[in-house]
Amino acid sequence: MTQFDTVIHSGQIATADQVFAGDIGIKDGRIIAVAEKIAGGERRIDAGGRIVMPGGIEGHAHIAQESSAGVMTADDYLSGSISAAYGGNSSFIPFAAQHRGQSIDHVLETYGARARRSVIDYSWHLIISDPTEAVLQDQLPRAFQQGITSFKVFMTYDLMNLGDGGMLDILTVARAYGAITMVHAENNDMVKWMNRQLAARGLTAPRYHAISRPELAEEEAINRAIQLAKLADAALFIVHVSTAGGAAIVRREKFNGAKLFAETCPQYLALTRDDLDRPGTDGAKFMCSPPLRGRETQDALWHHMAMGTFESVSSDHAPYRADETGKFTAGFDVAYPKIANGMPGIAMRLPWLFSEGVVKGRITLEQFVALSATNAAKTFGCTTKGRIAPGMDADIAIWNPDVTRTVTLADQHDNMDYTPFEGLQITGRPEHVLTRGASVIADGKLVGTEGQGQFFGRAPVDLRARPGVALPEFDPAQNFGTELR
């Protein structure tokens, strides 16, 4: 009989396909058996009928990352990973940001040193802001060989925006190596024009941030990004979709065969633009880009989530404290464009989605598993994570589906001085989280140690059932036999 290191027994195992009673046998950090009953085990964890599911994979977080303006996030890889683990995550993929003039080698070396403190496994998405010839032809391919198979680009912010031509260059390199390009889609000129109109009228309080970034700015940029990706025949991931129109474009283009993926975030489902109008400086705590929208948009995004428009729901954890080190580095009495954008949420992504989605019947438990872990594993090439099956990493979260609580800052276990979810009532909580079979959270308490997490490389994007869109200009029969791709 195989001697298991750990057996999780008496649980309701939830996967992206089904829910069933069973046990899980773990050895050397891997799942090696899933069965109705498993005996033995040097350690036996009694799930007590609770939900046993893949640990969450947080696919969108800013940890120990400088903004283009030089503002460092409040969470490093120790506090950020602890907060993620308390939220039911067993691994995450934060961003490693290249700023103008930096080499990709330098970026990965810098973030490699920062990430060694993590208590959960980690990988990175590269942010590309300076696609020089050396970056495109040498550095990105070498990053891909290290298992960094996703690159992010921006269509807004002057210090990050690549323009359409720069995006096409990145998309072309990504296609050649099987990488996926993530995009922050907002029309930069629309936003800048709106900023000028509002400033001329003296409308500079945080509440005007939402007005300055209209839904049209996102929808136009999402559509343009998709057309660029179709031209390059490349895989594209639209991050933080915040509008009904943007979601509808994604759904339409997926139906048409585009190599397209997308996410939304809890803040767009839980909060509204009214939160930006809180008194004093409190409204600034709710500034993020794209901005919060209205109640009717929330209903539309929930519908798209249930219908499969989005592969995942990610936190976009961007922890800037509401003080002079974060939101207000330029001062407390400044116009909204000088206030740092972003909100924390890595610990609340899954508890809030479970409570508002599964408990309230908006999504099924199986959909919750897919949105929290399995789809991210498939999309971003995490070949040994995101599923409960023999051979997978023993990345597991055990959830109590019945416990209720009021959200507090102390629950977040991060380095922030506020949570935008403060005071909300939620049902369901992860109580035990394992990464590769080692407990990080046990009985609701941190037992993992600094540096316990490991880097994991990732495979090329899985494009099965996404054939792409045939363009006549690339048909040899119509372009004089010239092979353009």
Image (cartoon, helix red, strand yellow):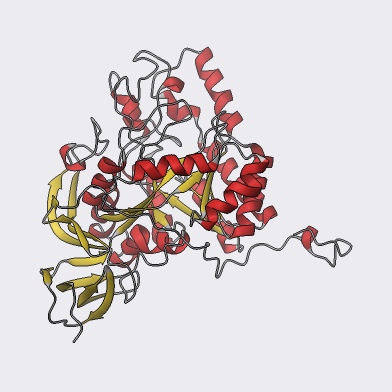
Name which residue lies at 37% across and 54% down. Answer: 455
- For the image, the number of numbered tags is 0
Q: Quadrant of residue 323?
A: top left
Residue at figure coordinates x 43%, y 39% from the top left? 110
User: Whole-percent x and y of residue 414?
Assistant: 24, 39
- Image quadrant for the C terminus? bottom right
Towards the viewer: 62 or 427: 62
184 shown above or below 308: above
Query: Is residue 204 in view from this perspective?
Result: yes
In this view, 315 is above or below 465: above
18 versus 400 height, above or below: below
Residue 74 in the image, given as x and y percentages of width and height: 31, 32
Is 234 left or right of 401, judged from the image as shown? right
Give the x, y percent position of residue 207: 39, 24
Residue 446 % position (x, y)? 15, 50
Give the side of residue 158 with respect to residue 59, left or right.
right
